[in-house]
Image (spheres, helix red, strand yellow):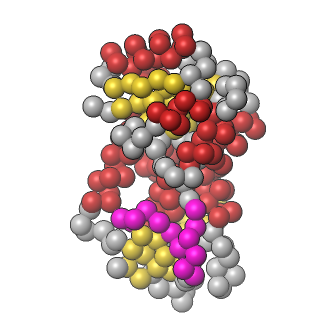
Amino acid sequence: MNKLLVVDDDPEITSLLSELLELEGFKVVTANSGIQALKKFDKTVDLILLDIMMPKMNGLTMLSELRSKYTVPVIFLTAKDNASDKIIGFELGADDYILKPFNDRELIARINALLRRKNWDNQANDSADKPAQYTIDKLTVNRNQRSAYFDDNYIDLTGTEFQVLLILLENAGKIISRDTLSENVLGKEFSPLARSIDVHVSNLRKKLPPRSDGLPWIKTLRSKGYLFIMDQNDDIQQD
């Protein structure tokens, strides 16, 4: 049984969501503030539904605190279709957004999609036929530890950013479509309007240090997708 943490400063909303989610077979813990949610959060939580507009500690601040230690999937609940809030949220490591008032079936579908992605991640990590570690240039990416280093310096990536990097690296030299990335990383079809996968790729680019050969790590190919660049002299080591 998957455990969800529902965070909203409106007790009526947390009560209604709790009832809906429990009928769907989830175990639900609720909190009415970001501070209370951080106290109730533990590693058994599989996903968080998080309101943005809360007093004292809003959802963006709570997510920032959470992402310093954990990579649990987070869906923002918001009453405002605010582009800047979405961008900030994705930069902090949010996995998805849903606007209030929301359709119950859509909410459940998005929750299940992210949980499937999380399970896919776990299965991929346990796969014996895939290398545990990749090294290209001075970049080292470890699948099992879900860590990335450049010249022995740790790169602080969110769970979503790491998964994007891993898929692109595993397919270095090949074009990966936005649809493929969105389905495998976010657990949903790519939406040209939402473009959340583009934000995650952009954040990843900002965090990766410059390559020794001066080439970009990731190239955008209009209408086609993304390409993890391999120079003719590059040799990806797999351990």
* Quarter of the N terminus within the rendering: top left
Question: Residue at point 34% right, 79% down?
Answer: 239
Question: Residue at point 25% right, 68% down?
Answer: 129
Question: Residue at point 66% right, 48% down?
Answer: 91
Residue 42, percent from left and from top:
42, 40
Residue 113, percent from left and from top:
41, 36
Q: On screen, 87 above or below 142?
A: above
Between 12 and 198, the one nearer to me in the picture: 12
Give the quarter of the image for residue 191: top right
Between 106 and 147, the one nearer to me in the picture: 147
Q: Is residue 136 visible?
A: yes
| Residue found at the far bottom of this picture | 233
Count every numbered label the image shows and give the total: 0
Q: Which residues are magenta?
A: 143-156
- Is 196 included in the stretch rendered in magenta? no
Give the quarter of the image for residue 196: top right
Residue 100, percent from left and from top:
61, 18
